[in-house]
Image (tube, coloured by chain):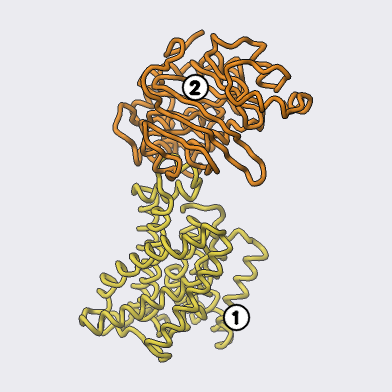
Chain colours: A yellow, B orange
Amino acid sequence: MDWVNAVIQGVLVGGLYALFACGLSLMFGVMKVVNLAHGDLAVIGGYLAVGVIAVTHVPVLLSFLVVVPLMAILGYVLQRTVIQAALNRSVLTTLIVTFGLSVVIENGLLQFVNANSHSLGTGNAIITDSFQIGSQIQIAYLDLLIFAVAVVVLLGLQYFLSRAKYGRLIRAVADDREAAQLSGVDYRHVFGIAAALAFSTAALAGIAYGMYSQFAPTTGTDTILLFAFAAVVIGGLGSLWGTLVGGVVLGVAQLVGSQINSSDGLLAGYIVFLAVLVVRPQGLVARRAQS
Amino acid sequence: MTGQPASGTPQNGSALLEVSDLVVYHGQLKAIDQVSFRVFPGEVYAFIGANGAGKSTLLRTIAGLHRPSTGSIRFDGRDVTRLRPERRATAGLGMVPEGRRLFPSLTLEENLLVGASYARRGEWGIERVYELFPWMRERRNQRTEQMSGGEQQSVAIGRALVANPRVLLLDELSLGLAPVVVQRIYAMLPEILATGLTAVIVEQDVSQALRVASHIHCLLEGRTTLQGTPAQVTAAQVEAAYFGLAQTPPGAGPAEQGSAQHGPAQDGSAT
């Protein structure tokens, strides 16, 4: 029964990892930018939520209404300025620039916030509660909620990409930037929109992580970015649903691993990650389903 | 001669597209060297020339995908030389790029929808394209990857048309297509142009170009070697201009220096 419990908890935390990963995957799929600052942006989302709650006293669950639009605007602006300037030089330059962004964000947070950990208390008894199945399996409503949010976010992205005008333009630009220009499409604007989406998902990931655990200025690179990378690689680069598969596989591997030996959870996750790289480097969900 | 909308040289009125002294480099290579021409409304202006003559580079430069080092491009009386490609497209310079360049992960209809995203007002719409190519209607939800070359070329033309361009740049329509298919696509050209479009085409098949064009312009290693209406030029002149043979026909301004610098032997083998 412990094993079943580990798998169930792993699946649920996999939703959180998918939330980490989908923005990273989107930015890579559309503009071939590997955003090394992705985890730090999620952490900024978390700190913004802390600030918004402190100032306005809105419930944690509603803080995203302010944080997500702010991060979307930040995404559009950063893409149109710093990241686009790097892209104009070469795709490799974007690696350096986003790495620099990551360093700037982490040190900025250390400077202006402090190194202490923060968490977002849900302050809501129903959410902090859990229910039992049988005698061994205990499922927290919060974990279930985060998983549901991840699925809804992925469904929403999928729907946007396949149905909305700008979703169509994002796919067109990802396919052939020049041909899109010949149809009058300003790909830089479309990139900006894709970045806004990616930053929005990062913000949600940061808020979710703050409720699930706690974050500090360095959490972005030492946890969120690493897990996001692992989920993207396991699931398959550029595939949206692949990030959910990847997140779930990573989550299950970690929790089953720590079931074997309580300190080996992370190790088990990375072993699966490496195994997938060796056996199926294109990821479990082959070929790009979307984006 | 079929499909010749403007008879003789339509030098009256103002040019819709005017290219002056254009020079374009590909790295060290001078791909376009001092090319000038004017295209008037209703014309079918055809560029001919061997592989590597610079025809596609010229068209891509007009569309904004390459930057000229000197020279200017005026469209509808306005200097567009520094304009971004998407701004030129929305101003009415449409292009069907070489190799079709459809969006492979999009369906046929989505390809057309992207073409229509920033369309000018006009008579072309997705429905109108379906009237022109009736087979598209029932296959509109298919991805274009699975379609034949001729079908893909039709989709590429449709994608350019739905933007309602005033000038349509057609780059190597016949590339990689069976002759029968090429005939079929060129047979549609008069119907397309009857809606008031002006066309600039690049074509390797000289006889095809002579059939549809109201004006031909021959390039050789980036330089103009011949231009005139199909009626004005003789087959011998075209051949000489195409392969860079010794005698230079009249009608081309800067051509005299051009021919002096070329060894004819190399050019002939380039085809």
Quarter of the picture holding the C terminus of chain B: top right
Q: Indicate the quadrant where residue A259 lies.
A: bottom right
Q: Identify the disc placed on residue A248.
A: none
x, y percentage for residue B183? Answer: 54, 17
Q: Identify the disc placed on residue B45.
A: 2
Residue pictured at 39% horizontal, 55% vertical:
A158
Asked which secondary structure carries label 2, the reply is strand
Looking at this view, is A193 or B263 the one in front? Answer: B263
x, y percentage for residue A198? Answer: 41, 64
Q: Indicate the quadrant where residue B140 lies.
A: top left
Asked which secondary structure carries label 1, the reply is helix
Residue located farthest toward the right when viewing the structure as drawn: B265
Three-letter code, disc 1: Leu
Q: Mark 1 packing: few (<14 Cα in 10 Å), some, or many (20+)?
A: some
Q: Decide: marks 2, 1 in contact (CB < 8 A)?
A: no
Q: Chain of mark 1?
A: A
Three-letter code, disc 2: Tyr
Q: Chain of mark 2?
A: B
Residue pictured at 40% horizontal, 36% vertical:
B112
Q: Indicate the quadrant where residue A215 lies.
A: bottom left
On screen, residue B222 versus residue A221, left or right, reads right
Q: CA distance from mark 2 to mark 1?
A: 67 Å
Q: Identify the disc placed on residue A267.
A: 1
Total numbered labels placed on residues in the image: 2
- In the rendered view, tell whether residue A22 sits above or below residue B241: below
Are labels 2 and 1 on one chain?
no
- The reply to whether residue A175 is visible in this rendering is yes
Looking at this view, is A238 or A261 the one in front? Answer: A238
On screen, residue A96 versus residue A8, left or right, reads right
